[in-house]
Amino acid sequence: MASLGLFRRCNRVSSFLCQGFKGTDSLFARCRIGGILSSKRHCSESGGFPSVVGHDLLTLKDFSNSEIGYLLWSAADLKKRIKIDKEFQNVRLLEGKSAALIFQKRSTRTRVSTETGLALLGGNCVFLTDSDFHLGVNESIRDTGRVLSGYCDFILARVNRQKDLEVLAEGATIPVISGLSEMYHPLQILADFLTLQEHFGSLYGRTIAWVGDGNNIIHSLMMAAPKFGIHLNIATPKGYEPDAEISKICQRFTEENKTSVNFTDDPREACSNADVVVTDTWISMGQEEEKAARLKSFSGYQVDTKLMSLAKEEAVFLHCLPRKPEEVTDEVFQSERSLVWQEAENRKWTVMAVMACLMEDYSPIHPMPEF
């Protein structure tokens, strides 16, 4: 009987969430729910949405489109309740909760968005860098995860290696959130999707052009975009392509969701008829010694007005910041087509949603946006 009840609740979830996705042949129906009936991914008893309580967010690869959509809905709801409605007292969802913030790499947006967002939710944090402790040096990473689990309610870690993040999560008995690794940056993509939904009104059917390095940002886009009916055109110089295994997974996601991914070394081809043009740093932290070689390899990859003119007339520009002038001209970066400041602000609302939803089944009070 318990199993039958869960099945019925999940059927109600499917019907409910379909309302938020565009098209008669709904995106939700064409995307696999990704194990929503499995032991770890269950339906909320009261909220009518897929629960992500207790989950780790290490990559968006293992999150279904309904789960990502729920996080985006929660972010939009928290933004409206706090920023627009000035409702502060009723959203202190993490009162008495604490987080360990592990930062092997410096950050502006990830740190400030997390600390200010957690404060708005009533929680507090402990900020840890290599000057406080050396992850995996005096103590195994697995043991550190277990120790921090006794002090805190969740961990957000910005690390050098994805493998270290995975080992940390294996040792921890509390949720672990990726603040970035060399392979993925899931929090950034949530902010990007919220920004695009706010601007266009939906994500389905859009084409995103990536112009730049095959790095953690495009890897994360590749793990999430096809699940929302988004097409990808990826332009990288030869030798700087996305990871081969991630590309295979992305190809599978596009086949399952009837979208497309196109790989090229021609930025003009990628930007042709695109709805969104995205770039990022050409020289990530730890690659400073490669600067001269990279600048030479990325010649012709600067996003300028000529490149933007190949995209749709209403196309917009995104950059996760910080930006360098060789990556995008001021004419594009400071233009009305640039959504970079809205994108940066949305880092706060999306990380707030992640923290809240991994801790408890948050019930948005505003209607679900159309994705």
Image (cartoon, rainbow, N blue to C red):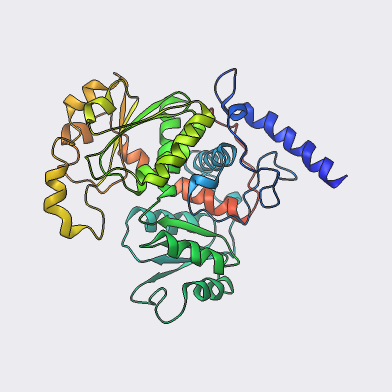
For the point 47% across and 54% down, which residue is it? 117
Let me know if residue 16 appears in the view.
Answer: yes
Judge whether 103 appears above or below 258 on screen.
Answer: below
Q: Quadrant of the N terminus?
A: top right
Measuring from the top left, give residue 259's x and y in whole percent.
46, 27
Residue nearer the viewer, 133 or 290: 290
Left or right position of 349 against 318: right
Horizontal side, residue 3 vs residue 303: left or right:
right
Q: Does residue 160 lie above or below 355 as drawn?
A: below
Residue at position x 24%, y 47% from top? 281
* Outermost bottom residue: 138
Q: Name the residue located 73 percent from the left edge and 38 percent from the top edge.
A: 10
Left/right placement of residue 194 relative to residue 96 reads left
Q: Position of residue 328 (x, y in %)?
A: 19, 38
Q: Quadrant of residue 334?
A: top left
Q: Name the outermost residue toward the right.
A: 1
Against 60, residue 124 (above or below) is below
Could you say where residue 366 lies in the image, as x and y percent from the top left? 60, 34
The answer to whether 98 is drawn above or below residue 234 in the figure is below
Does the image show residue 325? no
Residue found 49% across the figure and 36% down from its top: 252
Residue 37, by quadrant, is top right
Tag count:
0
Q: Is residue 49 left or right of residue 81?
A: right
x, y percent for residue 337: 28, 28
Q: Which corner quadrant of the image does residue 317 belong to?
A: top left
